[in-house]
Amino acid sequence: MPALRRSDGVLELGSVSLADIARDPRFGTPTYVYDLDGIAAEAAELKSAFDDAPHLVAYAVKANSAGPIVKVLAATGCGADVVSGAELLLAVACGVPAAQIVFSGVAKTDAELDLAIGVGDSGIGAIQVESVEELPRISARATAVGRVARVSLRINPAVDMQALDTHSYIATGHDEAKFGVPLASVTDALGRIEGDRHLRLVGVGSHVGSQLTATDGYLASASALFTFAREVRARFDLTFVDAGGGFGIDYGDGCPVRPADFMRLTRKLQREMGLDDLALYCEPGRSLVGAHGVLVASVIQRKIALPRRWIMIDAGMNDLMRPALYQARHRIVPVVHAGEAMTAYRVVGPVCESSDDFGVHDLPDSGPRELREVAILDAGAYGYSMASRYNGRALPAEVFLRGGKVLTSTPRGSVDEWVQDRLRAPLS
Ligand SMILES: Cc1ncc(COP(=O)(O)O)c(C=O)c1O
C-alpha cells in the first residue's frame, strides 16, 4: 500500500522525488517524509471493516504525533488513544472530539486526570483504568469538579507471551507486564466503580502487544475481553468493547494480515459472543502511519577495513530509535540507483554508541554517481515521536506530502537551540 516507487532510478514517495527533498535547502537531511494520502487511505481501509456498525478507530497518537497526521486522521473520522496530557491536548487541537478520545497509561498524574475529566462539556470518552489503585484517584479528581468520570477497564488478559508473535519489549498483555488490571483484581475494581457515583464504567478493553503479524494472539485477547464484557454488562451500562491496537506492518519479512482483517475477525467473534450491540473500538498506531513514512539521510562517508564495510549516514539512533531499542530492522535503500552493483554494507549513524547501527544492507558500490542519500523505509511509526537530541543533535525535519506535492513541513531543530537549552541553568 505505501506509494513508494522508482522513476528513472529516483525513489519517490507519493509521486515526490526523495532526492529533491533531500537536496532542497529548506529540508536537507535527516528528514522524515510522510505521505498523508497513504495514511488517509490506510484509515479508510480499516474503517471499511466495520461496515456501518458502531465503532471507533482510536489512533494511538504516540506512534506519530505530527499535527498534520493527527489532523488528517481526525478528518477521516478517527478518534485518538492518548497516553499523556500533552497528547490529549494535541488530539483536541487537531480536531478530535473529546468524546472520541480514550486515555491509556499506567501512571497518569493528577494533572492529566484533571485534563481528561475537565475537557469539553463532559470530559473525554473514557479514561482507561490500568490498576485498582487508580480508581480512587480518578474519583477524587472527578468529585473535586463535580463531574462523573467515564472509565473503561483495561484488563490484562494474561495471554501466553511465548505465543505472541512479537518482541518481548512490545508485548503488553501477558501477566508480567505492568499494563492493564490483572484478572485477579477485576472483581475488586468493579466493586469500587459500582459503589462510586463519580465513576461510570462505559467500556472494557485490552491490548496485547504491538507489531502482531498473525491474528491468533489478538483474537485470544479479544475472546477473554468479550467473555469479561458478557459477565459485567448485567451490572454496568457498557457502550463499547476495545480490542486495542497492535496490527503489524511489513518491515521486509512480510505481514500477510491487514488491519482490516484483524477487525473483521474480531467483529465476527463479537457477533458470535452476542455483543453486537456494543461499539467496537480499536487503537491502531503503527499500522496507520508506519509504512507511509521514510527517513531520508545523507551518506557522510564510507569506511572500509576489509572484510568490514561501513556506510556512515547523518541519521542516527536519536532520529530513529527502534533498531537500538528493540533490534528492529528497517530496510535501507539508495535514493538514487543508477544500476550500480550492490555490496553489503553495515549502515551506522554518527551517535557515539555501538547500538547506533541500522544493520547490514545491500547498497551501491561507488559508481558513476556516488551514493549521496539513502532512505530508511517504514519509519512513519515510532520514529520522530521517539527522537531525542542525544549527543547535541538537532531534531530532524519533517515533510508532509499530499496530492503529489509538499503540503507542509516542520523545520529541523537547530544545534544552537540545543546549546542555548543546555546553558539555561545559570551557575551562580
Ligand atoms: C494501549 C495501547 N493502545 C494502542 C497501542 C498502539 O499499538 P500499535 O502501534 O502497535 O498499533 C499501544 C502500543 O503499545 C498501546 O499500549
Image (spheres, rainbow, N blue to C red):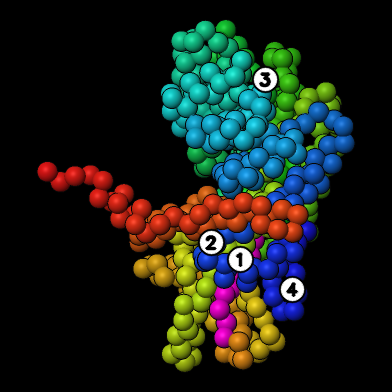
Residue under pointer 3: 202
Furthest residue in direction front, as rendered: 25
For discs 2 and 3, the disc positioned in front in the rendered view: 2
Mark 2, Cα crowd under 10 Å, few <14 / some 14-19 / many 20+, is: few
Q: Residue at x 80, y 40 (%)?
A: 47
Name the residue carrying label 4. 6
Q: Is mark 3 within 8 Å of ligand 1?
A: no
Distance of mark 2 from mark 4, alpha carbons?
23 Å
**With 16 as the anchor, is 209 left or right in this view?**
left
Q: Amino acid at mark 1?
A: Ile
Under mark 3, the amino acid is Val
Helix, strand or loop status at disc 1: helix
Q: Residue 95: within the magenta?
A: no
The residue at the point 66 percent across, 63 percent down is: 251
Q: Earlier in the sequence, mark 2 or mark 4?
A: 4
Q: Which amino acid type is shown beneath numbered disc 4?
A: Arg
Q: Is residue 242 left or right of residue 416?
A: right
> Looking at the picture, does residue 252 appear above or below residue 229?
below
Give the dominant element type of the magenta stretch: helix, strand or loop: loop
Distance of label 1 from label 3 (alpha carbons): 47 Å
Of label 2 and label 1, which has the lower sequence position? 1
Q: Residues within 10 Å of mark 3 (few under 14, many from 20)?
A: many
Residue 169 is left or right of residue 41, and the answer is: left
Circle 1 residue: 21
How far across and down, in percent of the image, does residue 193 sit? 58, 15
Estimate the x, y position of residue 90 in percent, counting from the top left.
55, 35
Marks 2 and 3 sit apart, C-alpha to C-alpha, by 48 Å
Task: Nearest to the eye among marks 2 and 4: give it.
Answer: 2
Start-end of magenta stretch:
370-379
Q: Label 2 vs label 1: CA separation?
A: 8 Å
Q: Position of residue 136 (x, y in %)?
A: 47, 17
